[in-house]
Each structure stands twice: as C-alpha cells, then as structure tokens.
Image: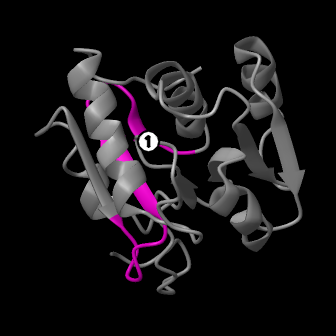
Amino acid sequence: MTVDWDGQIRMDPSSPYAMQRLIGLKDRFDIAFACDTDHDRHGIVTRSGGCLLQSLPICRYFYLFQHRTKWSKEAAVGKTVVSSRMIDRVTRSLAVNLRGTGCFKWFVDGLLDGSLGFGGEESAGATFARLDGSVWTTDKDGIVPALLAAEITARMAAIPAKYT
C-alpha cells in the first residue's frame, strides 16, 4: 500500500490515496482488488467504475440474496451504525430483513446461527455465509468479498461500474 493523503501509512483500502497502486491497475484488468495487511478489508477497482468504495456492498446484497438459494429465507443483512442508509433501501426492495448494530463484533451470534447472511460496514469490512448458509467467519474478511466481486463479474458477464 502507498501512503495516505497526509503521508501516514494507514493500510486503509477505502482511501484512494492509500490505494494508488491498485487504482493504477484499473485500466489493465476488468477488475482488480487488494486487501489491507491483515486482510480484513479490501479495495476494488474496475475500468468503468474506478475505485469502488461505499456503493459496492449494495451490489453484493442484490447478488447474494438472489444467488445463494441455500441460505435461510429469513437470513438478514447486518449493518453497523455508520453504514449507509442506502442499505436500508436495498434490503427493503429485496424483502430482506435488516439488523443494525453498533459494531461488527455484534454480528457473531447471527453469523453462527445462520440468521445473518451478510454483515458489513463502511470501512470495507464484510463477511457472509458460505454457499450452504453455514458460517464462514465471524470476523471481517477482505479476501472472500474481493473474490465475490470477481464472481459477480464472471457470472453476470459484465464489468461492474459504480454501483448505484
């Protein structure tokens, strides 16, 4: 990672300054991604959308809750208090329950019992259930959400733009 806007190293994949090397790949690949040093957050760039930040989870909700047919029909989306209200609108449109919480660690019980299919926050931290609906991890994971972006790109036969 490169340094942030003020010369400090923050390892923040949601910062366009820290993600300069990744952003430099946007014209070479349909989709490219990188994780921070402990791999609990990720950044994604595409040719058409540039650096995809806060709006990316919205596409994931649409995709996951339409393509993970083995998930419980009652599985909810978990969001932290600092997450976008756009998530509320998307979950309503999908008729998916939304569970708000103060911080990521409060998703653990829902991930373990299968009542949450996805948990995420604005800082590019996310986790979601396995294909069969069982728990994958109870902590933020950057690798699997980044790979999900590649899956979406391949299965939808389209390069993601800025998701709106």
Asked if the stretch drawn in magenta spans residue 26, the answer is no
Would you say residue 46 is visible in this rendering?
Answer: no
Q: Quadrant of the C terminus?
A: top right
Callout 1 crowding tier (Cα within 10 Å): few <14, some 14–19, many ≥20: few
Residue 153: which quarter of the image?
top left
Q: Residue at x 10, y 40 (%)?
A: 28
Type of amino acid at the residue the image marks with label 1: Asp
Q: Which residues are magenta?
A: 35-53
Q: Residue at x 19, y 49 (%)?
A: 25
- Mark 1 = which residue? 132
Indicate how the structure is coloured in the image.
Answer: one colour
Q: Quadrant of the N terminus?
A: bottom left
Asked if the stretch drawn in magenta spans residue 42, the answer is yes
**Where's residue 42, x and y in %?**
43, 60
Q: Residue at x 81, y 19 (%)?
A: 92
Residue 62: which quarter of the image?
top right
Q: Residue at x 65, y 50 (%)?
A: 114
Would you say residue 38 is visible in this rendering?
Answer: yes
